[in-house]
Image (cartoon, rainbow, N blue to C red):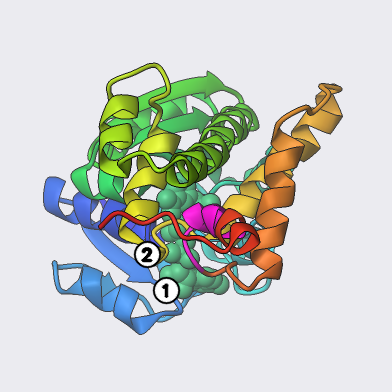
Amino acid sequence: MKVGFIGVGNMGGPMCRNIIKNTNHEVVVFDLNPDAVKACTELGASSGASVADVAAGCDVVITSLPLPKIVEQVTLGDGGIAQNARPGTVFIDLSTNSPATAKRVNDGMKAKGIAMLEAPVSGGTARAAAGTIVIMVGGDEAVFEQNLPLLKSFSGEVIHLGEVGFGSVAKLINNMLAFCNSAAAAEALMMGKRSGIDLHKLDAVIRNASGMSSGYANMATKALAGNFAPTFALDLAHKDLRLAMELADEVGVPGMIAPQVLNLMRMARGMGMGPDDSTSMIRVYEAALNEEVRAP
Ligand code: NAD
């Protein structure tokens, strides 16, 4: 089978490389960034000339793109997948979108005889590289079953949630929870810093106690090392939380905690940290208190 992969960045790159390593499929990649393409062609993928070229020549087309508007442009726009893929092609979107975007893209694909699975992922770049991410899938059950071996080739857990839209719902709720944990971790670490406690020992306690979460672990690892190089950009985390707040509005759930975290992200972006890692949220506290939380 010929698999096209469009968007081979921080997440798409390692997921695509796992398909290359773990299957016998022929893989064709396309990305605006030539270095990202090279990291996949070095492992045996070929390089597509454009979105249209990849879409026209593949049995399955996968995307992992930063923002919903880019997903819409690459899927439904001029020169996009819907215009160029053959009827019968399967389209799998691994990006994080709003449920409404996923449904709109699904309608556009359906009109062209293309079956779609929305399949947002969670686990970050380390688990993407290890092939242990979780994939949350919305879409037709038969299409899901048919593509399960491909999805399993680059993940640890694949969960089918029902029709298109529910994958995005699960992903946005999960990420809202993770960012709240991460923001609380920033506050906790700053409290630790100002109390004078040994931060490595505090960290050892939390990692073995009830305050532990993957949001905490990620924040502590990056803040203590002072490494805010983006594995998950703050701009993308902000996009996810904004979409989660839209969902909360749609379903009428009041926000007591997450809107505060969204404000923290807005502050960090206002300070110019949008392209940095999402854990840069802690640097808002650091700037306010003129003190850094570091323990290299
Ligand atoms: P990224 O910016 O590292 O990668 C996106 C890639 O898409 C880039 O290489 C970029 O050049 C490419 N691209 C952008 N526009 C394009 C276009 N028109 N045509 C072709 N390529 C294009 O982002 P990422 O962190 O890999 O995130 C991708 C998606 O996965 C996002 O929706 C994000 O929310 C989601 N996600 C990210 C993480 C994470 O930890 N980084 C975790 C889970 C989900």
Say which quarter of the image contains residue 152: top left
Residue tagged by mark 2?
8
- Would you place residue 259 above or below residue 76 in this image? above
| Picture residue at 33% right of the left edge, 33% below the top | 202
Mark 2 crowd level (few <14, some 14–19, many ≥20, 10 Å Cα): many
Say which quarter of the image contains residue 69: bottom right
Give the image location of residue 234, x and y in percent.
56, 58
Q: Are marks 2 and 1 in contact (CB under 8 Å)?
A: yes
- Would you place residue 133 above or below residue 62 in this image? above
**Three-letter amino acid code of the residue under disc 2:** Val
The reply to whether the residue tagged 1 has its Cβ within 8 angstroms of ligand 1 is yes
Give whichever of 208, 168 is nearer the camera. Answer: 208
Residue tagged by mark 1?
31
The reply to whether the residue tagged 2 has its Cβ within 8 angstroms of ligand 1 is yes
Span highlighted in magenta in the image: 276-284
Q: Earlier in the sequence, mark 2 or mark 1?
A: 2
Mark 1 crowd level (few <14, some 14–19, many ≥20, 10 Å Cα): many
Compute the Cα span from label 2 to label 1: 6 Å
Give whichever of 282, 12 is nearer the camera. Answer: 282
Q: Is residue 221 left or right of residue 271?
A: left
**Three-letter amino acid code of the residue under disc 1:** Asp
